[in-house]
Amino acid sequence: MKYLITLFFWLLLIPMSQQVSAQDSTQFDEIRQSIETAVDSLQPERLIGVNTKLKTLIQTGDPEIKKFAYYYRGYSNYRLQNSFPKINEDQQEEYLDEATIMFEKAVEMDPKFAEGYAMLGSCYGMKASGFFSGMKYGPKSDNAMGKAKELAPENPRVVMLDAIGKLYKPSMFGGSTEGAIEGFKRAAELFEDWQTPNRYAPRWGEAEVYAWLGQGYVQAEKYEEARQAYEKALKVKPGYPWVENVLIPELKEKSQ
Amino acid sequence: MTHLQCHIKRAVSFIICGIVVIAAVIPMQAQQRGQTVIKGIVLNEKGKPLHLAHVMVEGTSNGDVSNREGRFQIEMPSSGSVVIVVSMVGYAPAKEEVNVEAAKTVEINFQLQRKQAKLDETTVTADAFTTGDTEGVTLSPTEVVTTPGAAADIFRSLQTFPGVSNMDEGSGLFVRGGDVSEVSFVLDQAPVIHPYKYERPTGGVFGTIPPFLVSGTYFSTGGFSAKYGNAMSAVLAMESKGMPDANQFDANIGMAALSAGGAVPIVPDKLGVRFSGNRSLSQFMFKVNGLADDFEQAPMGADGNFSIIAKPYQGTTIKFFNYVNSSRVGVPVPQPSFDATYRSKEQNRLHNLQWKQLWSNWLVKTSASVNRYQNDRQLGGLDLNEADRAYKLRSDLEFSGFENMIWYAGMEWGRFGNEFTGQLPGDEDILDPTADFYTIDEQYFTKRLGGYLESEYQLLPQWKLRLGVRMDYENHAKEWTIDPRISLQYQVANHSNIRLASGRYHQYAEPFQYNSATGNRNLGVQQAWHYIAGYEFKKSLFHVRMEGYYKSYDDLIIEDEQQNLSNTGYGEAYGADFFFKYSDFMRTPFNGWISYSFLRSKRLHPRQKSGSIDYEYAPSAFDITHNLNVVAKARLVDMLTGGFTYRYSTGRPFTPVISAEPASGGYYLPVEGSVHSQRLPHFHRLDLNLSYYWVPKQNWSVIFYTSVSNVLDRKNVTDYTYNNDYSQRRPIYSDYSRFVYAGVTINLEL
């Protein structure tokens, strides 16, 4: 009888644990969605709310959940830093610092976390804005991005973030518009066949890569290609506000 | 009634009751939701609304984010006591307990304070200048090596800061009226007992440690923390480079030197090595500049470094640093009675094993080091071999587990020795090989023990306090010294602060000064008090510092008629320093800095007078009233940069010879006037440099550089020399006439 009772409890626990994981998974799905919705709707308040939910997830004992909680906290701060032009520059710097800390923690938890390294490399890259800061953060950015590429050379977000770095870096530190365009093209191809490896993993970037490709073309003064890239972005994500309201008007202004 | 009817009746009654209850409860809840509210405004430290602060009821997910007016509103599902937490990136969180009553609105406002930067000694002690790649450093490593006239030397770069006097064209650090010997030099906790190459009384020509081995420096010109002992004026703490993160190699070919080095991570993030070698051959450079005749043996030397860095476990770093350099020089030194050549051969070795351990909030750094120095000097009949040793154990502990407080503690033990062999003149002023000399073979040792305890508090958001005490003991002086140190910083606004600092600083005699023949076995410890008040403004591209100070010296070791040496000296120094810096190298098309120092320094000087000693309180030898440095660098075209450094200083004081008395053998002994009653002519120097950065591929760089020192070919006077009977004097000019140097540096990352 004792064994039967034990077995009964075990049988009860299995669906319960599955339920917990399913809850976390659902929560991450919601968080992913909330971040993207907040960014698209230009509502930073919503992102702040997401961040708070993530703070509680960091308290969890599950290292996998904790790692992704750090990742998404970093990601929401990363978005606060670069997607809301109305936030003042001082505060944007604070968000970038916070994002950097979060990604550093994420890769500390899992030294083979390619997505974390790629974001960390991107954060360092944004800090390397001048010669002096370039001397300091440039190698750090290269190092983190190098690790990401080594760990996941076929991950489209890794390839895309590396290309974004190339677009902004001074040529003496490895920047190149042509190199960036090639990188965005490759990332776009990789996105087409990309299978998300687990239920927590990030899923953003599929439309964004075309937005970046368009910007690469704008920088290279290839306006027709840029227009096509933006159209493709809108096809992947209909009504994409960044493309529709910001990038396309900018392109029209430049190409006239 | 049938059984079924009974069941139906019960069910209907139950439903009706349920509807009644629900009908009663729903409006109640609705009423509460509509009316029980916590609202308010979140402000920043200046009282302006904060957008995007997160306001939350603690322990729940109920909250709001402040809007552009800083306003928030939280609807409460229930009444009672709750804690509201407000947080925002970059600000310290705030929380407050509020009691909410049903159907009422509670208003509560929050004022968030900016998070304070991590406390560290550079922010809380008095004035300090830093180099390195951390945030807030005064100069980056690139700036050190691109400062015109600094010859890629750390010490020479630091000379362009306020508080350091231009005594001559060497690299000696004379800080705020103190002697060059009053500065303590530390590398990774290990003492560097001979920090200069080609030593002379005013320091040396270069610093011993090349800048390429150093990742950062901390240079305090006064009011420094209790961590540092046995220094009355200043501290230069250097940190050697750590674990390499990529295969890096560099080579430099210059007119006077060839060097190469590398850094290899053998096991990434676990084990790495750094190595470098440098060979200086200045003969060619002096020939090009027409100065070959100034040397009997042009300066030449070699140095090598090998470091192993291991991180075997999380939080553990073990570094084994080894450095050796040797140099030699021969300079003709015309003497009144004979033509002589001064020859010097030096060797300096430093070995340091350092273990750093980080446990949660604890950081422990322990070091065991050996520094050995050997010098052979010859001039006329003088032939002196000096061998100095320093063995040291040091441990420093840092605890940052408390909010707004950091504790520091440490202990050090050292054994220091001087050994002299060779022959010395009977009369120190007569070096003619035919005069009388005696042989010496002497060894002297001292042992020192020291410890400190220090803490930093964030008293209030705007106030920081650093309190420390240091104790030292030396086996000859046989007395414990207790040095209190205090620094207080008030944050006037976001970008400016006021600092006050004071403390007592002790320094022991050198081991050889305890000898009974020419020294004194009973010498005590010398001491100085520092009083400093300063203001700093740092915002965006601008950095301004102003500091006033007063230093008093007591128990200084000076010559004594009865005891050879005694602690009867005293003195004082006071002045003001000003520093203005604009931007960083290559951050803007133009950057640079201006430093100005005003100084008055006086000391009690002994004077030999026909068998007796008189004392005179007069300006010290380092009393350089005005010091001005202007450093400017500009990006000229593409990656071509140019810059200049202009240095001006009041001529240093000297004691004139006013007559001479005949001595035996046709020699004359000089009769001096008042101590330091005259000054050398003012010092001026303008240096230029030009560099071109070429990046053939990512992480590779080639730097072509050329410099012209003393562009105006100014003949700066370094001293006066006299004829045989001292009836005529003529100036001795600096060796640094107009001088051209060029080279190329290649950096590769593989």
Image (cartoon, coloured by chain):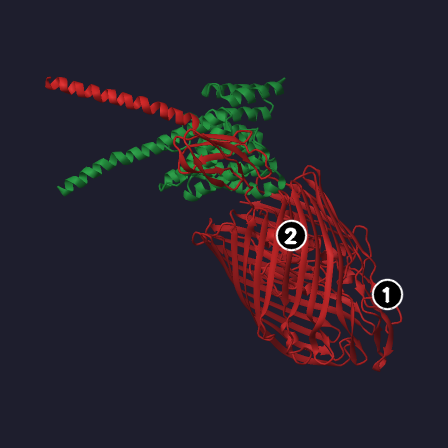
Chain colours: A green, B red
* Residue type of the residue flagged with mark 1: Arg
Mark 1 Cα within 10 Å, few/some/many (few <14, many 20+)? Answer: few
Q: Position of residue B89 (x, y in %)?
A: 52, 38
Marks counted in the figure total: 2
Q: Residue B734 lies in what quarter of the image? A: bottom right
The front one of B531 and B136 is B531
User: Which quadrant is home to the C terminus of chain A?
Assistant: top right
Q: Secondary structure at mark 1?
A: strand
Q: Is residue A205 above or below residue B165?
A: above
Mark 1, chain letter? Answer: B
Residue at image x 22%, y 22%? B14
Residue at disc 2, secondary structure: strand
Choose between B564 and B495: the one closer to the eye.
Answer: B495
| Front residue of this view, candidates B606 and B382 | B606
Q: Which residue is mark 1?
A: B730
Sequence-wise first label, 2 or 1: 2
> Badges 2 and 1: C-beta atoms under 8 Å apart?
no
Would residue B684 be visible to someone looking at this image? yes
Q: Which mark is residue B499?
A: 2
Q: Residues within 10 Å of mark 2 (few under 14, many from 20)?
A: many
Percent position of residue A107, x then y: 44, 42
Where A132 sits versus B446, above or below?
A: above
Looking at the image, can residue B328 be seen? no
Quadrant position of residue A129:
top right
Q: How far across and how far down the image is residue B139, in percent?
A: 64, 48
